[in-house]
Image (cartoon, rainbow, N blue to C red):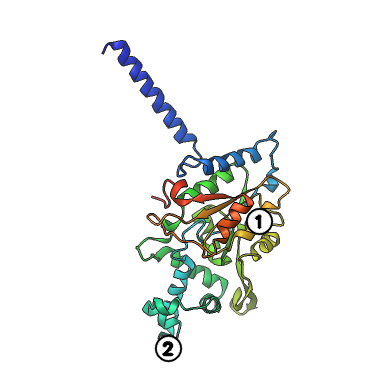
Amino acid sequence: MNIIVIRRVCFICLFLLQVIFTLAQTDPLPSWNEGATKDAIISFVKDVSTEGSDKFVPKEYRIATFDNDGTLWCEKPLIQGLYVGYRVKKMAAKNPALRKKQPYKAILEGDKAYLHKLTEKDLVSLIIQTHTGTSEAEFDQDVREFFNTAKDHNGKAMHQLLYQPQLELLQFLRDNGFRVYICSGGTIEFVRAISQEYYGIPSEQVIGTRFKYLYKDSANINDLYRQPAIVSFNDKQEKPVNIRYHIGKRPILACGNEGGGGDIYMLRYSQGNTYPSLQLLVDHDDNERESAYAEKDNKSLNWAKKYGWQVISMKKDWKRIFPE
């Protein structure tokens, strides 16, 4: 091979490497596979944030809402469920009688058969018992201790259960003038404890299930106290209600997940916007890297097909799921 051919080959290789490097540097969603879903997201964001575009949306209306469990971090195991177990252990240490009382006994002994029989009413009651009776300062400290020390059944810390592709999407939206909100079925103060650290989302941009609070101002006390009553359970039809209550505007982008049908009304509410909008639904179809599961009635995916939402396949659309 003569020297001219060698030089040409080297030049072509260097050129290709530069192209690859440039693409890697400019790709806002590097953990997403190339395809229709990624293209739809990038095109939408660029269209609504580019002045002169026929789909341009003023910055004050560029609002995005994301569910949390199963959308931004995993929900199998349910992280707030792990916190319930953490609280039960602390409560039983102070009150040993709880070790013989259900459902505390089943939680402490890992009796899955008993726990699977708990109704939604039982679970709500359990959350109330483990999440109330303290001041807000005490609760916040306890939650932060949990996030700093807790592990899942595989030994992963809580921050390792975030979805890396979604972290990139959150940043991509912020880079293009979006205000991003979490709209979670989890309790609002639980999520607020880590929203800034985990997602870059300030606590005032978190919407969630709310307890009744009582303000106390007396000797050595100046704080809110958590009462054993839920004011708003932020799920299904309640999500649009609370979005209006907290934000006062419809989101132009809404992202939830299939698995419990809890996010479909948030996506429909977004779709009623007078501005262009995009709805995203995460499909848990990757049993190798995460947990594959689906709704018995397939309602979320059926609505996605009916209303033209963009379905995110974990298996096909995400190069990797969790942070390295």
> Dot 2 surroundings within 10 Å: few (below 14), some, or many (20 or more)?
few
Q: Using the image as rendered, state which of residue 139 and residue 97 is in the foreground.
A: 97
Check the image and report above or below for 125 versus 3.
below
Residue with the mark numbered 2: 97
Report the residue at 45% width, 35% height from top.
24
Q: Single out the mark in the foreground, 2 or 1.
A: 1
Q: In which quarter of the image is the N terminus?
A: top left
Which circle marks residue 268 in the picture? Answer: 1
Where residue 310 appears, x then y in whole percent? Answer: 57, 48
- Label 2 secondary element: helix
Q: Which of pointers 2 and 1 lies earlier in the amino acid sequence?
A: 2
Task: Determine whether, in the image, residue 152 is placed left or right of residue 221.
Answer: left
Q: Is residue 204 visible to us here?
A: no
Q: In which quarter of the image is residue 45?
A: top right
**Of the residues shown, which amino acid type is indicated by label 2?**
Ala
Point out the residue furthest to the right here.
Answer: 274
**What separation in Å lies between label 2 and label 1 (alpha carbons)?**
47 Å
Where residue 205 appears, x then y in whole percent? Answer: 61, 57
